[in-house]
Amino acid sequence: DTAVSQTPKYLVTQMGNDKSIKCEQNLGHDTMYWYKQDSKKFLKIMFSYNNKELIINETVPNRFSPKSPDKAHLNLHINSLELGDSAVYFCASSQDRAGGQGSYGYTFGSGTRLTVV
Amino acid sequence: GQNIDQPTEMTATEGAIVQINCTYQTSGFNGLFWYQQHAGEAPTFLSYNVLDGLEEKGRFSSFLSRSKGYSYLLLKELQMKDSASYLCAVRDSGGYQKVTFGTGTKLQVIP
């Protein structure tokens, strides 16, 4: 019974293609996030949604577009993929917009390893 | 903005104690998290500090000094399965309380 599930786990695609990554959480959390982890393992926030409202939008190319149809889902669509987009993308959720109050923190999905060739 | 520093790598012996340090500079502070990430897996939440002092959870403890912008994660009775990266993350006090991660410390536990 996975709490935060992402699909696909692996994605290999050619430059210029458009792809989507899906994320769903069954924890009843209000806030969801997309993070990118590069080859040096640096985990950087991209977007955050609170109850379907975009609340954090970091300096990310506009080729990346998040979509949240409801508070349990946050998908990431990437247009015109580039070599530099190769990374692991993590979806996460928390009980509130503060990154997890008290002792809960984030719950992360298992990640999507995107390789652009 | 936030700046978070951690050592890149550490090695420690099974059964020993290891301390992983984290220093941060932030324009506003509202809590510090530690996460564990095994290779090829997702980060998992370990601890949270918002007030000065030590928080203990079994073999793991985390300490915070807000005036010094300093935290450490203490791992006792090291086990081989503790080999992982340990990520320090700071939450700011702005309206959206963004959480920024450090680059992580890769810990190798040797027999």
Image (cartoon, coloured by chain):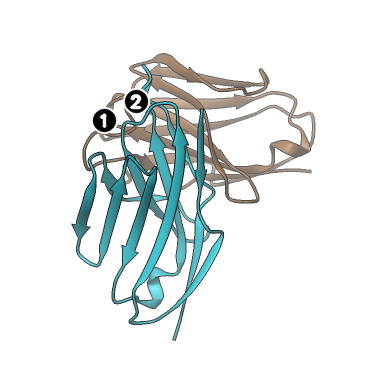
Q: How many marks?
A: 2
The chain letter for the residue carrying disc 2 is A
Please tell me which residue lies in front, B82 or A114.
B82
Identify the secondary structure beneath mark 2. Answer: strand
CB within 8 Å, label 1 to label 2: yes
The chain letter for the residue carrying disc 1 is A
Residue B59 in the figure: left or right of residue A21: left
Q: Position of residue A69 (x, y in %)?
A: 41, 17
Please tell me which residue lies in front, B15 or A54.
B15
Q: Is residue A8 above or below residue A32?
A: below
Q: Position of residue B102 (x, y in %)?
A: 50, 45
Q: Which chain is in brown here?
A: A
Q: Amino acid at mark 1?
A: Gln
On the image, numbered disc 1 is attached to which residue?
A: A95
Q: Which chain is in cyan here?
A: B
Q: Amino acid at mark 2?
A: Thr
The disc, 1 or 2, on the residue closer to the chain's N-terminal end is 2
Q: Quadrant of the C terminus of chain B?
A: bottom left
Q: Position of residue B58 (x, y in %)?
A: 20, 64
